[in-house]
Amino acid sequence: MKIFVNALTIIRILATIILPLLWIYIPPIYLLIFVIIILLTDVFDGVLARRFHVQSLFGTLMDAIADKIFGIILLLIIASYHKLFYIILTLELLIAFINFISFFYGATTKSSILGKIKMWFLGIAAACGIIYIFRPTLATIIKFCPYLFNNIELIIYIVVGISSGAQIMVFFDYAINIFKELKGKKQKIHLSLKTDKELKYNLFNTEFYLEHKDDVYSNLLFKD
């Protein structure tokens, strides 16, 4: 089951990578179905991991990477239709960059309440972007909400503005917390991985992960 759960996460990454290509060649309704399937794998891999007690550090890391890749690629596609989305795409890349750097320096960048709120607003913005792109098709299917389709441009300006504000707050929240954590420490960047045996154990052993899930992940992967 652990292999299956991790495979779901990896499939999500691969599916996200080919999403821009499919966007060009397949009809809108199939694109929507494909995006929904990607989102469902994000739900099921976590649920199955907890249900069958097969959580792992590898799964957690891959899940975070898959979420970030999916968000950035989806925003990039939407921004090619509506330029305003380049704002939240740029901010999301900055947040990803600071997370990446802090990881290798051994700082903690665990998700906060503010980060979760940001993700909700970002999800709403992305959903509005998809509605904007596929509004001719969706308007013929969904008849009960004409206001949404008639005012989608205004709604996008509102949700992108809110999302941008939330992203800026998250960026500075991460930056300040990381600075406080690393201040006074002569912290060097982690580059040398642990031995193959130790690394395999740390990445895939469920009991090890549950015991150390609140630790700094880079310390579990790299030598001091």
Image: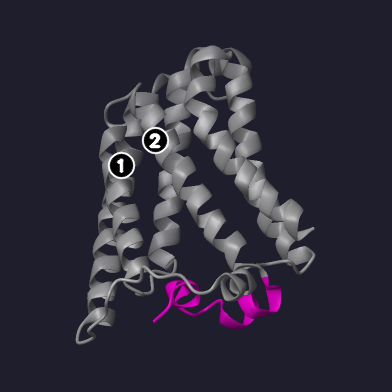
45 left or right of 1 in image: left
Q: Quadrant of the N terminus?
A: bottom right
145 left or right of 95 in image: right
Count of numbered circles in the view: 2
The magenta-colored residue range is 205-224
User: Can residue 142 be seen at all in this image of the molecule?
Assistant: no
Say which amino acid is labelled 1: Ile
> Label 2 neighbourhood size at 10 Å, few (<14), some (14-19), many (20+)?
many
- Report the residue that reaches farthest toward the left: 184
- Report the residue that reaches farthest toward the bottom: 184
User: Can residue 161 be seen at all in this image of the molecule?
Assistant: yes
Q: Which residue is mark 1?
A: 88
Magenta span contains residue 211: yes
Q: Which residue is mark 2?
A: 75
User: Secondary structure under badge 1?
Assistant: helix
Disc 1, disc 2: CB below 8 Å? yes
Residue at 66% in and 43% down: 40
User: Secondary structure under badge 2?
Assistant: helix
Residue in front for this viewpoint, 12 or 203: 203
Residue at 70% in and 51% down: 44
Say which amino acid is labelled 2: Leu
Above or below for 10 versus 211? above
Above or below for 211 versus 153? below
Q: Percent x, y for residue 94? A: 27, 51
Dominant SS type (magenta): helix
Residue at 62% in and 69% down: 200
Above or below for 87 versus 102? above
Above or below for 25 versus 35? above
- Residues under labels 1 and 2: Cα distance? 8 Å
Q: Quadrant of the C terminus?
A: bottom left
